[in-house]
Structures are given as structure tokens and as C-alpha cells.
Image: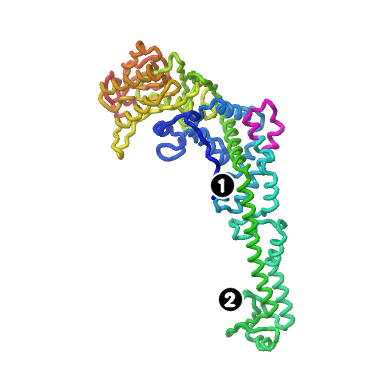
Amino acid sequence: MPRIARPLRRGDAETLGLDPATRASLDLIQARDGTTTHTLFSAVDRCVSAAGQRQLAQWIAAPSTDLALIEGRQAGWRWIAGQAGLIASLTPILKRAPDLARALGRLSTGRGLPRDLAATRDLLQAADALVALLEPLCNEATPALIRTLFAGLYGRADSLLSTLEKALSESLPARIEDGGAIATGFDPDLDRYRGLRDDSKRTLAALQQRYAEQFNVATLKIKHHAQLGYIIETSALHAAKLRDRPELSFRQGTANLVRFTTDELLELDRAILEAADRAAVIERRLFAALVAETVSHPALPELAELFATADVLTGCARLAQGGAWCSPEMTQDQTFELKGCRHPVVEAALERSTKFIPNDCLLPPDQRVMLLTGPNMAGKSTFLRQTALAVILAQAGLPVPATKARIGIVDRLFSRVGAADDLARGRSTFMVEMTETAAILRQAGPRSLVVVDEIGRGTSTLDGLAIAWATLEALHSQLGSRTIFATHFHELCSLSDSMPRLTPYTMAVREWQGDVVFQHEVRKGAAKKAGGCMSPSLPECQCRWFSAPRAY
């Protein structure tokens, strides 16, 4: 059986709850078109190794609710960012470190190659280099995660490293069957058989010269025949004077060539063949022993994980130094404050000449519900998604694209932005919307964050308004969730009188000489009119402001 890591039990209380609809809405690891280009992962990935990228993807896919774990990760990358020149020194070490987890996987399933053992050797050498780099910097003030990295990498597999350095050749073959994986000097028997095998050309050349002089035939050759093995070959012209020699045995003749052999040549042929076979057998046995020693070493899986963590922390430090990214303050209450927050994926996709307009998001306990109105194309969906992504990054322990952030731990995040259908399963757009809304109302609680857009859009105006009204009332008065509720039903803004924790906000829009100018700013207040299609790229579309209620 392959070596399999022990399963770890992780309860729901340790991980931020993200349902499938929320994951699809936010494009965390994979976009809805199946690519990974415009995703949260691609926007924040600064790792230099495949193992680090896998670790980063795991952190994003399963953000934590453990305050100590989150703060430990933050302290780790902040410490790296604060050490002068440390990022530049760590990067080449991490970049040359092989993917040990993949190599161990192949070795443990019997599909290991010589390069997998070399990957183990190279990572252990990189671990020594990383320890030497961190040792002068580590003290009592060093964050616990960095000290864990140092202690976990320090001298954990020195004996295995010494064995692999002695055993593996500098130039490794692609497969063990090709030979040459084990270094000269590691095993005396292997060296002896290799010597006989590799020196056979010189031995045969010397024997050929001796036979040519002994039999007085300058054109005599010793060649290898597929069926006959090593034979003496000469022309038919010289065959007559060789046939009578008692030490020669006739093997084969043609019109132009005659082949002979001797007892000495037959013995040498057997020795060469046995030497090659014996060398291959011994090399495979030594390789299997090295694989067994490597796979059974208890420290290697942890070393692979520690290297991946070091790569992620270094990538976070590099990301934080590259722009307006902050380390959010995490609390156990219902605080929610984002200053100058941006959408990392949209910002990464913008051209350099275009600047992303940041926005604040304040959801204190006494004003935990934001009712957001404004026309289409004004940026409501972007604001909703960037708020949700900020929570995911914060609880993954990563930098947040904001000037300041203070977030109370979120136990469940619900994001319902955009319309979709599932016709193959018999669900229309409205049915999908209602199913997702029902899931939110069943599962959300006081520590949850809910960002929803245009609830009730898929039915008639009055029915949609009633659904949106009831959903907003439940989130405000019954569930107590921190909520951003975007809508075109601006009549809901009048509910701030009966819902004390609801605050109306709107997207800033100006009309200038008959054109609509989107300012992409979130301001307190309510839109006086609902907006239909406002796309400036459709000049033939008769865009107008019009009063709700109206179906869209």
C-alpha cells in the first residue's frame, strides 16, 4: 500500500462556510468560463513554486475562522516583509526547491524515477540553506509560525540527505532501466561489474590486436553478432589459413566473410553479458532500498508542507509590498470596517492608465444592514464582490486590498450576485434565485455576512418587491446578519424608519449634457430613480431613467 497521510478532522466551526453558489459567484480558484486567469487566486498569487501555489489555493478555498491561526499567518508574512532583503534572499531558495509532495507520491506508488530521489535530495539541501538564512534572524520576538518553520526544517533528515548525496549520480537517467542512477563509489560490487561492462571495449580492442598479430591477418575484426555473440570476422580470402588453427572454431561462413570464435572469446562474451545484467540487478536493488528509506522517513511530508508555507508567506510579503494592501485587524465581535477597499481581480485586469476607485464599507452592529441602490453599470456588483473577497482574504490570513480593515470573524459567507439558470435540472432563473435565497435565510446567522443583488428580479414587479421586502426584513430583524442588499426597488429605502439598523447607500451618478457619468463611489443616501440599461457602448439603446416599480 502507498504511504498515505493520516486524515485530519476539521469541523465546520474551523472553516468559513462557503456554499457552491457563493464559490461560483466569487470566482475564487476557477472562473465560470473554466479558466483561472481572472480569479482571486491569480490576482494574489506571488508564489514561485507549484507546492506554494497549491497551499495558497487551499487557504483561499477554505478560509479559517480560528483567530489564532489567522493572526499567526499575518504575523509570519509581516515579519518577512519587515526584514530588509529577506524576500530577495528567500526567493531563489524557494524557486529551486522541487515539489517534494509530488515526488513522494510517485515514489510511494511504485512509479518513482531517479529524478524523484534527486528532488528529495535537492529539497533537503534547500532546507539547509533556508535554515542557514533564518538562523541569525530568529529570536524570542520572531513570530511563532516562522520559528515553527525554522525548527521544522532544522536537521530533520540529515542522514537521509547524506545517503542520497553519496548514492545519486550527478547526471541522472530518465529511468532506472537506463542505468547510471547510482554514483560510482557507493557500492563496490556495482563498481566491479560496471568496470567489466564498461571496459569491455578496451578489452576487445586489445584482444583483436593480439589475434591479428597471432594469426597474421591484419584485417581481422572482433564484432558482436545478435545470435552468435562476440565473434572473429575475416574475409573469405584469409579464411583458408585460419581453418586449420586448432584454437579457432568455425561458426559461420558467407560468400565474402567467415566467422570464428575461441574459448577465450566465448568466456569473455559470457562475462560481459553477465556483468551488464548483474550491474542492472544491483542498481535496481540499491534504488529500491533508497526509495524505501525515503518513503518511510517520517519528516519528509512535513518538510514539503513547511516549504509550501514558506513560499506562501513570502508571496504574501511580496504582495503587501507591491501596493496598498493591509494586514486586517481580526476580532471576535461583529465589527466590520473596510477603508479604501478595492476589487483585486478587477484592479489586476485594468490597464495601467485606468485607476480603480476604492470604496469604504462600514457595517457596525448598530448599522449592520446596507441597502444599496443605483443604476446598472454603476458598480454595485463590483462593490458587493470586493467586500466578500476581502473577508475571504482576511480569514485566509492573506493581505487585503484596502488601506485599513477591521473585521469580526465571519462564520458563513453568502454571495448571490448575478442571474443564472439550471434548465437541465428543470430550474429557471427565478427558481435558482429563490433556491439560493432560501438557503441564505435558512443558514445565515448573527456572525454571517450576506451580499445579495436584485432579489426578486425574476418575477413581476409587485411580487418581486414583496420578496425583496420580506428577505430584507428577515435579514435585519430575525437573522441579524451583516448584510449588503443591492436592489432596484428604491421604495425599500423608506424601510429605514421601521428598521433602525438599516442604512441606505447609493452609487454616485451624474448627468452631464445628456450623458450618464458613473462615479463608482458608494455614498449615503438613496437613488431617487431606478436605472435600466446604462451601457455607453450601446448608442442605439434608448437608455432612460424611469420610476420604479418596474420589471427588468
Secondary structure at numbered mark 2: loop
Picture mark count: 2
Asked if the stretch drawn in magenta spans residue 133, the answer is yes
Extreme residue in the top direction: 497
Residue at horizontal 67 percent and vertical 47 percent from the top: 160
Q: Amino acid at mark 2?
A: Gln
391 above or below 231?
A: above
Q: Amino acid at mark 1?
A: Arg
Locate residue 21 relative to residue 134 in the image: left or right.
Answer: left
Residue at horizontal 45 percent and vertical 37 percent from the top: 30
| 67 and 461: which is toward the camera | 67
Q: Residues within 10 Å of mark 2 (few under 14, many from 20)?
A: few
461 above or below 423?
A: above
Which numbered disc, 2 or 1, marks the residue that appears first in the sequence? 1
Q: Quadrant of residue 52?
A: top right
Residue at horizontal 70 percent and vertical 77 percent from the top: 264
Q: Position of residue 177 (x, y in %)?
A: 59, 60
Q: CA distance from mark 2 to mark 1?
A: 45 Å
Tag on residue 3?
A: 1
Asked if the stretch drawn in magenta spans residue 176, the answer is no
Residue denoted by label 2:
227
Q: Position of residue 414 (x, y in %)?
A: 41, 27
Q: Quadrant of the C terminus?
A: top left
254 above or below 146?
A: below
Q: Is residue 435 visible?
A: yes
Boundaries of the magenta span: 130-149
Q: Residues within 10 Å of mark 1 (few under 14, many from 20)?
A: few
Q: Position of residue 143 (x, y in %)?
A: 64, 28
Secondary structure at numbered mark 1: loop
